[in-house]
Image (spheres, rainbow, N blue to C red):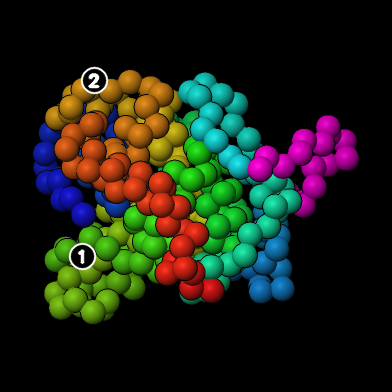
Amino acid sequence: MLRLPLAARLAAVTAVTIVLSGCATAAADGTDPVLAEPAPTTVPGSAAASPAATPSMSVSARPSASRTAVAAPARFTTLKPGSKLPSGSQCAAWVRARPKKENKGANRTANRTTGHKVDPAAFGDGAALARRVDGQFTGTTEEILRWAACKWGIDEDIVKAQAAIESWWRQGTLGDFDTDAAACPAGHGLGVDGQAGKCPQSHGILQNRYPYMKSAFPGAMRSTAMSADLAYAIWRSCFEGKESWLNTVERGRQYAAGDAWGCVGRWFSGRWHTAPGEQYVGRVKDYLDRRIWQTADFQQP
């Protein structure tokens, strides 16, 4: 993965923002305050079909009888900037109406584990979007990716292809090994994960990077839904035009809202339409065209 010096990011950004680089995100001050969040909740295997009950939401397989029933979409597509986004509970109902088999058996525990809230301040102008992040869904790996796509209004096939690039859909993937122990979450100190003198900064199915999104941990590390929820909240913030700081740093063109692929590339490079981001987008598009998640080699039930 591309490494961008943190000092270069900090000098360019004057407001508190998140700068994700593929598996890397940076706040303007180089930190993301750790909130006192509850630990992620693991749902017992027998309850995996329904998310854990929380004070703020209740999910059922079908819409409430008091509401007009809406048929579950066959697939989720990109919603333009300014669109009203479906709630997490509505997306859960739609996804469960069209169940998908598990093809990544190693994710079963993480797929039954829900997430928690994050610090909205770390999103800068996208703080309102950050408040929607909670990782409150359980299901198979493909169902979780579809839920995140629905919740954040991004084409589900882009999500599936990008997650394959980042982790081959394995929530336990570790990346961005470095020598700074403070840049890695608890339990992943130097040398613990098999690389002498190094520890992994990036975790999860979308490779969320700990130093720049600390308030999302441990959820992003333990919960597949949390990892995906956070990643596409940030994508939506970019897509809505909330990241004007991208016009204050190196870029290939002027940043503007509504560029879905530009925001995919920014996840990797932390910049707008620069060569590394464009190359990353090319890899994601290749997996999308090949529908890599449907190939025989991808199936690991």
Mark 1 lies on residue: 177
The disc at residue 254 is 2
Counting from the top left corner in percent of width and height, residue 243 is at 33, 27
Q: Is residue 83 left or right of residue 60?
A: left
Counting from the top left corner in percent of width and height, residue 120 is at 44, 38
Q: Is 13 rendered above or below residue 199?
A: above
Mark 1: amino acid: Phe
Which structural element holds mark 1? Answer: strand
Main SS, magenta region, reads loop
Give the magenta-colored segment's residue range.
55-74
Q: Is residue 216 left or right of residue 282?
A: right
**Residue density around tag 1, few if under 14, some if 14–19, many if 20 or more, within 10 Å:** some
Q: Name the residue at 12% across, 46% down.
A: 5
Q: Name the residue at 47% across, 58% down.
A: 293
Which structural element holds mark 2? Answer: loop
Q: Earlier in the sequence, mark 2 or mark 1?
A: 1
